[in-house]
Amino acid sequence: MKLDFELVPDSCWYSNLRSILSRAQWDFIRKDAYARAEGKCMICGRKVARLEAHERWTYNMETETQILTDVIAVCHLCHSVIHIGRTQLVGDEDRAIKHFCFVNKCTYADYIKALARANELHRKRNEVSEWKLDLTYLKRYIEE
């Protein structure tokens, strides 16, 4: 799927680059993502006036490590799909469903299946009580 859910393990909620880095460091990284995006969402390709920075993480279950792999610029609708749990809480799931189906050229049934897979992966990741953090990705922003 071009656009998918990225459910963060519960123990990692509210742990993001904005809370770890200084304001200036975060601004530098997010503005780099915006520049790479050239005014378009890096997922759906829509040209939008305002982009949002999204951190991409992978999870190594063997080492119990949360790994930062990228920071991308996305439109609000794609970001709402990615963080569907929050979107459901604020009552905006209908718009997210429509956007998910439009971007992925799929049906509502496909949406439900993808959400079930994401929830199962989330459940497995929640079996890890504390994730180690790998921020090696940020080395690209450090001059040697």
Image (spheres, helix red, strand yellow):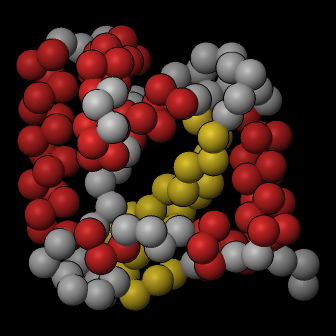
Q: Residue at x 16, y 58 (%)?
A: 121
89 to 47, vertically: above or below: below
Looking at the image, residue 125 sits to the left or right of residue 109; the answer is right
Q: Position of residue 120 (x, y in %)?
A: 9, 54
144 to 19, vertically: above or below: below
Residue 70: image quadrant is bottom right
Is residue 53 or residue 67 the one in the foreground?
A: 53
Residue 102: image quadrant is top left
User: Dividing the image into 4 quarters, which one contains the N terminus?
Assistant: top left
Looking at the image, residue 63 sits to the left or right of residue 103; the answer is left
Is residue 15 or residue 91 the one in the foreground?
A: 91
Q: Residue at x 44, y 62 (%)?
A: 57
User: Dividing the image into 4 quarters, which one contains the C terminus?
Assistant: bottom right
Q: How many badges with numbers are in the image?
A: 0
Q: Position of residue 143 (x, y in %)?
A: 90, 78
Residue positioned most to the right: 143
Is residue 136 or residue 10 the one in the foreground?
A: 10
Q: Residue at x 33, y 37 (%)?
A: 90
Does any portion of residue 42 appear in the rendered image?
A: no
96 to 114, vertically: above or below: above
Q: Position of residue 52 (x, y in %)?
A: 63, 40
Q: Position of residue 12 (x, y in %)?
A: 36, 73
Does any portion of residue 15 appear in the rendered image?
A: yes
Residue 106: image quadrant is top left
Residue positioned most to the front: 90
